[in-house]
Structure formats: structure tokens, C-alpha cells
Amino acid sequence: KIVEFSEKTHWLDTGFVFEIEEPKASCMGSLRAVRVAEDRWKLWTVYTVIFALDGVETLDEQKMKEKPIANGAPDGNFPEQTDILVIGAGQSGLCLSALLKSFQIPHVVVDGNQKCGDSWGTRYEACKLHTPKKIGHMPFLRYPENYPVFITAQQLSDHYESYRKSLGLPVYMQSRWEEGKWDEDRKEWTNKIKRKDGVKTIVAKHIVMCTGVGNTDPYEPEIPEREKFKGDIVHSVKYWNAEPWKGKRGLIIGAANSAHDIAMDMVRFGLSSVVLYQRNTSCMITCEEAIGKHYEHYNDFTPIEISDQMSESLPPSIGRILLNGWIKFSAEQNKEFYDSMKAKGMMI
């Protein structure tokens, strides 16, 4: 099909399947071509991936629920050895665990939180994703149909815990990875895991870090004479909701996602005024744009694994250029919205 990214940016986008002999596998690919003349197209990008190894049995959702994983159940004794140690039981860790189990590969997932999903469930009450749920579905079990387009943090947390239990994944919570030492002769990692019942040792051939891209360690700058301020000063990491401040004035330092969530929360709880302090410009797009064109290959009829391949097939360097171009095009198409934001003092 022809992808029209903007009025001046479009290309031919198509997919193909093929097989290879070593290893014997089924593969898929995608390519993009751009028109360089009236009757001539030039190849732009090519992407290929193996999606099935011949002779390797994989488990479907029902078989995964019925079949225990090697290394024992999380409710049993902590294992001493495994093939793969996955650190972190957020979305990436859980997705990887599900896929490893489908290939019947022994592995263990450790996470320092109290329960699966706490990386989201312990955030402020009004927290929700700023990307539509259709791009975040996980292997084998999609988000429930009754979840909204923009999932709340608590819903995400609940789904992670349900996902772990439904698929019987070997996830050990309250198990914080402390260190790992590589043995060159044995070609394995010896890892120290801190648990409630003491420090445990587990040996693994491979380690996968699934610890996220964000940082929940709050940065709180030193403010001269801070002690003279009689109101509350709270970082968003420690914030829950604005109920205790009803009728008071609120000042938010920052103007990104958390800041806007909390600003709306303050309005909801009836603060007398809410001000955002913005140091630099912020990138903003409308919800309609986020749901629509930017993620149009994620939809109700394209399998999620195909949508993922389409998304990942674009080289990051080109993706950044296109994204910047799309944001500028979006701003032109939604000039009234952006003008109204600027009129309120927002730097965009």
C-alpha cells in the first residue's frame, strides 16, 4: 500500500515471506520504496525476521496454562540454576517470560517489588498511559475489552498480575538482584538475589535486563530557605492525589506527562488555582492524533505480531526524522488547538 505520512512524505510499503535453510526456518520481511521518477521506484529500507524454527515445538495459550515450567513454581523453593535469568517483571520481563515458556526454555524472572505490576500500581492515583492500549497488547493474552483506550496505572498493574498467574510464569517477587559475576571458564553467571528469607544464589547461562527506561529515583533540588515555606512540597513519586489540598493553590514544577496528570487531578479535587511552571518547550500531540495515524498499523484486524514487525522495521534514525516531520505536520493540521495552548502560556 501507499503510506501517506504527510502531504509531502509518502512511500510504498509491502511485506513478504520466505524460508531459509540454515537454520531451517520460516521468515517474514517488509520493504519500503520511494518514487524517484514518474515510472521508477527506489528501494528505501528492508527488514527481515525469523518467526518460526522448523522442528521446534511451541506452546499455545492453553498448553502454557496446563504445562509447568522447568525450575519449579514460584511458590516453591527458590531455584539454584536456570538457563536464563530475567531481571524485572514489568511488561518486557513478562512478555519475554511468556515467549520463553512457549519455547519451553528454562528461565527465572526476579523482581524486587511486593507484587507483579507494582512498578505501575504504586504510582499516583490519576496516572494512566499516554499511548493507546492497542499498541501495548502482550503475547497470548490481550488487554480486556472493557479497558479504556488510555489504560490507568492500576488496570495495567492488575493485568500484569493476572498475566503472570494465567500463564503460570516462573516469576519470583520480593527478589532483588544484587550482583552477578561471570565465570569465563564455566561460561555462566553466579547471581546474588536478596529475598525476605535471605540472600540466595542462582547460576544462569544468560541474563536479560528488563528494568525499564524510566527512573523512579526522585530528583529534588536544594531550595534555599525551603523550611520557611509552610505548605507541602511533594515529588510526583510520592504523590497520591490532591484531596488534602482542596481550596488551596497548587504549583507544579515541570510540564511533561506527570505534570499534566497531576494538574488535572488538582482541578478535579477543587484547588483554587493550578499553575504549571515550564522551563523549556514541550512536545505535545492531540489524543486523536495519538490514537489515529501515528499508530494506524495497530488495529482490530491485523495480528499484533505483524503490527509489531511493521513498527520495528523502520530504522530508528529514519523513525526519528519521520516523527519530527509528522509532529510539525500535526501542528499545522491542528493549529487552532496549539494556538489555544500557546495563548495560555504553554511553550510548544
Image: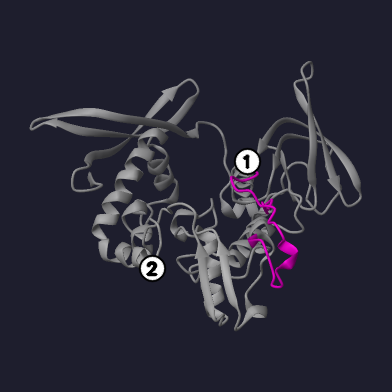
Could you say whether the residue bearing mark 2 is in a helix, strand or loop? loop
Instruction: Give the vertical position of 122 relative to 186 (above or below).
Output: below
Residue 145 lies within the magenta run: no
Dominant secondary structure (helix, strand or loop) of the stretch shown in magenta: loop
The quadrant of the picture occupied by the C terminus is bottom left
Return the residue nearer the eye: 246 or 292.
246
| Neighbourhood count class around disc 2 (C-alpha, 10 Å): few under 14, some 14–19, many 20 upward | few
Q: Mark 1 — residue?
A: 100
In-image side of 142 versus 173 (left or right) = left
Of the two numbered discs 2 and 1 in the rendering, the one whose residue sits closer to the viewer: 2
In the image: residue 294, left or right of residue 246: left
The x, y position of residue 328, in whole percent, is 29, 50
Which residue has dot 2 on it? 344
Label 1: which secondary element: helix
Per the image, is 219 magenta?
Answer: yes
- Count of numbered circles on the image: 2
Please determine whether, in this image, residue 307 is positioned above or below residue 132: above
Q: Is residue 47 left or right of residue 43?
A: right
Frontmost residue, 96 versus 72: 96
Q: Nearer the viewer, residue 5 or 72?
A: 5
- As shown in the figure, which amino acid type bears the numbered disc 1? Leu
Give the residues in magenta.
211-236
Q: Residue furthest right?
A: 197
**How far, Cα to Cα, is label 2 from label 1?**
50 Å
Residue appearing at x 41%, y 51% in the figure: 303
